[in-house]
Image: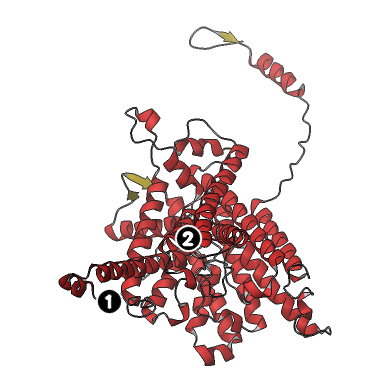
């Protein structure tokens, strides 16, 4: 027997004996291992399956305007050369549609039949919905640092009144996508039907195709000259630009704005605009408006000089009000075309001007916009707006000697800063790798058009943008394969890296001695 300071008695041997008996009563059964598909593998396999099915269907007689298999378009007899060439072209188009890129190696309106156009549109829609669904779930993980199944915490942070499970989140996303696509279709239909003289059926088909292609940021058009014939229609160009912008902002930002009610005096009912939404909105506004103004000034007397604006001051001085109104309208059309084209450079492959005639400074600006792209959890590709902002904030903090990265009276964790750096380095490394490969394979194209067109093609493909300097059809078979791979990796690569880093917040128990090295 032992006695402690408080006078309490306890028997060590008896207590240990009782504890041992208690432990031996437990029966340890082996746990069944739960097998779950890695989200990265699931995403990669999903797009591979979508591209494979799309390639087969687009190559079939029902999709070809000739009514034959694609490899019989140029010759009635079968040859392996025609087979691989046609298969590669349709693989390219299926990848471009599924990854909502927009690059084309054929003339879409004449090469495919109506069913072929339907297959393209289905690939765009399925690819876009898959992207925004996966992207939104990934953003919830990265923002809230929660595993799959814990999305409700993050949704609450975006102003929702009640928590949402994954099924509810998916339903909201699908509703969000189809609502904006329907509204866009209605507006475009009235322009096609009343303003441009399309028949009822053709106007409805063209409006729905271009509304879905715009909102999904694909940029594939049923017009042989893309949207150049419609650039004088201010309502049409503004609608397309708005759809592309909404598709590139992301579901969480739109949902946050819809749930923010500034007129409520009660702060709990008013909601709040999250830091993520504020960064996305301000950065998108800066790139679209600021970049649009710079691009418009650079191209004012070049590609935007498709219409004579006259002299508004001379018309005003002589009291010619009709000419003054026409001059102001033409100036507005030029500005609208310039800003709308800038929105296309960030994420969609539509063009309202001749891209091949753009001046070198404007081309460099467009490449910069393509590399940045849209926002997380959206249809858009690129490095993403928030990633660029975090990178610049990190650089600013280090230059000022501030230990933490701060914005809007909030600090950003070191983990997010490292993720931004990794994504930017990965993105630039892949762009220059593909560019290097094309420099080796496209000697004939370089001799004809120069080497900058290759860098432009790679930036557009890996950023899933879709604009081109009219060099895509001139690529060799190897070059087409390289651009196809760039479109695929540009779509799933950044998301896969984000997923990989989201689950690697592991605390290290061992810390090695520090030693300095010289950088810079």
Residue located at (31% from left, 44% from top):
409
Q: Residue at x 51, y 72 (%)?
A: 467
**Quarter of the figure with residue 308:** bottom left
Q: Secondary structure at mark 2?
A: helix
Q: Nearer the viewer, mark 2 or mark 1?
A: 1
Residue 351 relative to residue 37: left or right: left
Q: Say which of 335 and 12 sits in front.
A: 335
Residue 29 sits above or below residue 421 on the image: above
Q: Could you say which disc has been placed on residue 310 in the image? A: 1
Residue 388: x, y in percent? 41, 60
- Relative side of 448 to 13, left or right: left
Q: Residue furthest left?
A: 317
The answer to whether any part of residue 513 appears in the image is no
Image height check: is 459 above or below 143? below
Viewer-side residue, 241 vs 414: 241
Residue designated by label 2: 240
């Amino acid at each position: 027997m032992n006695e402690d300071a408080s006078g309490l008695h306890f028997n060590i041997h008896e207590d240990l004996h009782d504890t041992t008996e208690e432990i031996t009563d437990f029966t340890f059964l082996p746990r069944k291992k739960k097998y779950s598909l890695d989200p990265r593998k699931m995403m990669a396999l999903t797009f591979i399956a979508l591209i494979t099915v799309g390639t087969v269907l687009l190559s079939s007689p029902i999709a070809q305007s000739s009514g034959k298999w694609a490899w019989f378009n140029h010759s009635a007899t079968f040859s392996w050369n025609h087979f691989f060439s046609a298969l590669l072209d349709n693989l390219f188009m299926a990848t471009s549609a599924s990854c909502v890129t927009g690059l084309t190696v054929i003339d879409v309106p004449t090469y495919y039949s109506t069913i072929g156009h339907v297959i393209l549109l289905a690939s765009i829609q399925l690819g876009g919905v898959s992207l925004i669904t996966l992207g939104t779930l990934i953003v919830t993980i990265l923002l809230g640092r929660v595993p799959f199944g814990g999305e409700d915490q993050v949704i609450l942070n975006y102003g929702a009144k009640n928590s949402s499970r994954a099924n509810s989140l998916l339903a909201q996303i699908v509703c969000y996508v189809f609502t904006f696509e329907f509204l866009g279709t209605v507006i475009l239909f009235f322009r096609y039907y009343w303003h441009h003289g399309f028949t009822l059926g053709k106007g409805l088909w063209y409006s729905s195709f271009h509304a879905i292609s715009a909102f999904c940021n694909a940029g594939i058009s049923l017009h042989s000259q893309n949207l150049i014939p419609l650039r004088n229609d201010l309502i049409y160009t503004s609608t397309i630009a708005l759809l592309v912008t909404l598709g590139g902002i992301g579901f969480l930002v739109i949902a946050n704005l819809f749930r923010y009610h500034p007129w409520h005096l009660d702060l709990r009912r008013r909601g709040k605009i999250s830091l993520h939404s504020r960064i996305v909105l301000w950065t998108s506004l800066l790139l679209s408006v600021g970049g649009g103004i710079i691009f418009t000034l650079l191209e004012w007397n070049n590609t935007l000089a498709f219409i004579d604006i006259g002299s508004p001051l001379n018309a005003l001085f002589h009291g010619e009000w009709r000419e003054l109104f026409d001059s102001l309208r033409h100036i507005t059309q030029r500005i609208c075309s310039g800003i709308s084209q800038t929105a296309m450079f960030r994420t969609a492959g539509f063009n309202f001007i001749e891209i091949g005639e753009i001046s070198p400074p404007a081309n460099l600006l467009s490449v910069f916009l393509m590399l940045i792209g849209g926002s997380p959890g959206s249809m858009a590709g690129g490095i993403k707006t928030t990633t660029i902002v975090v990178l610049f904030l990190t650089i600013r903090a280090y230059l000022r000697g501030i230990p933490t990265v701060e914005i809007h009276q909030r600090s950003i964790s070191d983990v997010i800063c490292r993720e931004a750096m990794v994504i930017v380095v990965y993105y630039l490394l892949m762009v220059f790798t593909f560019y290097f490969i094309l420099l080796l394979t496209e000697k004939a194209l370089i001799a004809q058009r120069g080497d900058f067109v290759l860098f432009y093609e790679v930036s557009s493909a890996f950023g899933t943008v879709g604009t081109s300097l009219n060099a895509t059809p001139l690529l060799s078979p190897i070059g087409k394969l390289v651009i196809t791979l760039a479109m695929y990796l540009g779509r799933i690569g950044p998301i896969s890296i984000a997923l990989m880093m989201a689950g690697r917040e592991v605390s290290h128990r061992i810390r090695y001695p520090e030693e300095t090295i010289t950088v810079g």
